[in-house]
Image (cartoon, rainbow, N blue to C red):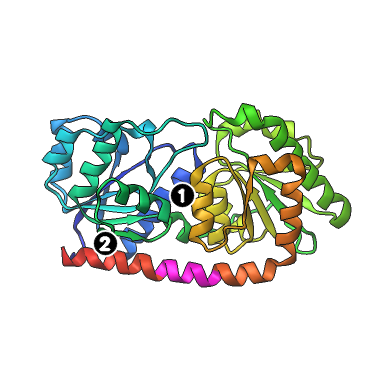
């Protein structure tokens, strides 16, 4: 594809969610790097839910339509319109998308699955963020050979050093925390266990290692929950995605629930522990070949989070080396995937 071409980018438009914003930035960074001078046009993923002649004309007037990344295969964005799928003539690329099913959530309905299948069959190339999503598509009759596991685009998001880093100390242990309070309906059931486990872990490292604890805010809804952690001297960090990733890279450990707290930490080569409220948390840990970096909700009452944090910090250097090697492989894989577009 020559420079100057027009690319429609269809993606989640929730700018309040730092993870969703990071994905959009990362995908567009990759497209601009691969196709210098390209013109990018943003469309929300909701545009695929119904047939609209004007939207269809915009898509079909472009040279390429890129769908993703992120949790596009999610019940909130479904079903996609079968009529819309059939009418799109522009080549479609699915780039770094994921299937989401939270603990306690219903299975997708037949019409929702049908829309995903229709999109996948129309796509010239399919790149998913994890093996779980590939398995989901293959189970629904998409040829496995057509599906590449290329990782989450946000892993490769470029960092930007903020003008002020808030007094980061290189001599103190620095731990980042994140909670998911942006729509997961199951939080209430586990609320007390989650808060107690986070507090126990933070207080242990504050008492024994003079640790500085940061709360890594990913969504405005978290303002309704982080005060309940009741952690002394907790520093709240709410920076733009690229700047926040810079901070992730200066921490010693991240304990998070939102998937992209783990994704940004991994991309910044910082050891991370994911508190698994969703199947995608485990899937991400398997994708980076570190399935042990997950704490199940049922383990929280038994001190599982503190035990895991102590274990991971003892192996911090080893995890950083392992992450660096995997990130390099993802970078090569994503570049190879983008290079295939020129063959369409």
Percent coordinates x, y for residue 198 in the rendering: 73, 42
Which label is found at residue 145?
A: 2
Q: Number of marks in the image?
A: 2
Quarter in which the C terminus is drawn: bottom left
Front of the two marks 2 and 1: 2
Residue depicted at 44% across the width and 71% down the height:
329
Residue depicted at 55% across the width and 70% down the height:
324
Q: Secondary structure at mark 2?
A: helix
Percent coordinates x, y for residue 267 in the rendering: 53, 61
Q: Is residue 151 magenta?
A: no
The answer for how far apart the CA atoms under marks 2 and 1 are is 29 Å
Q: Name the residue beneath numbered marker 1.
A: 22
Q: Earlier in the sequence, mark 2 or mark 1?
A: 1
Segment tinted magenta in the rendering:
324-331
Question: Which quadrant of the view contains residue 79?
Answer: top left
Residue nearer the viewer, 104 or 171: 104
Mark 1 nearby-residue class (10 Å; few <14, some 14–19, many ≥20)? many
Residue nearer the viewer, 7 or 178: 178
Q: Secondary structure at mark 1?
A: helix
Residue nearer the viewer, 99 or 37: 99
Q: Is residue 326 magenta?
A: yes
Residue depicted at 13% across the width and 32% down the height:
53
For the question of whether residue 227 can be seen, the reply is: yes
């Amino acid at each position: 594809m020559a420079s100057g071409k027009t690319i429609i980018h269809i993606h989640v438009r929730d700018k309040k969610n730092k993870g969703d914003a990071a994905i959009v930035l990362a995908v567009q960074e990759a497209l601009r790097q691969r196709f210098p001078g390209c013109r990018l046009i943003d469309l929300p993923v909701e545009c695929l839910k119904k047939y609209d002649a004007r939207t269809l004309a915009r898509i079909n007037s472009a040279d390429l339509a890129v769908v993703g990344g992120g949790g596009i295969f999610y019940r909130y964005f479904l079903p996609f319109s079968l009529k819309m799928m059939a009418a799109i003539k522009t080549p479609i690329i699915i780039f770094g998308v994921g299937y989401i099913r939270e603990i306690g959530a219903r299975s997708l309905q037949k019409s929702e699955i049908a829309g995903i299948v229709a999109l996948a069959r129309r796509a010239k190339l399919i790149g998913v963020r994890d093996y779980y999503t590939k398995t989901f598509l293959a189970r629904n009759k998409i040829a496995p050979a057509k599906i590449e596991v290329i990782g989450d685009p946000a892993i490769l998001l470029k960092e930007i050093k903020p003008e002020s880093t808030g007094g980061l100390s290189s001599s103190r242990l620095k731990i980042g925390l994140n909670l998911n309070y942006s729509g997961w309906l199951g939080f209430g059931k586990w609320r007390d266990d989650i808060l107690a486990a986070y507090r126990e872990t933070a207080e242990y490292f504050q008492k024994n290692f003079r640790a500085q604890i940061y709360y890594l805010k990913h969504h405005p809804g978290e303002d309704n929950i982080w005060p309940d952690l009741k952690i002394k001297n907790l520093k709240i960090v709410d920076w733009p995605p690229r700047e926040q990733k810079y901070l992730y890279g200066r921490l010693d450990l991240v304990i998070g629930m939102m998937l992209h707290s783990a994704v940004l930490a991994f991309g910044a080569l910082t050891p991370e522990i994911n508190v698994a409220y969703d199947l995608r948390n485990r899937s991400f840990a398997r994708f980076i070949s570190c399935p042990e970096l997950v704490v199940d909700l049922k383990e929280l009452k038994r001190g599982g989070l503190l035990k895991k944090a102590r274990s991971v910090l003892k192996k911090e250097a080893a995890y950083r080396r392992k992450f660096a090697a995997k990130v390099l492989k993802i970078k090569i894989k994503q570049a190879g995937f983008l290079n295939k577009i020129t063959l369409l």
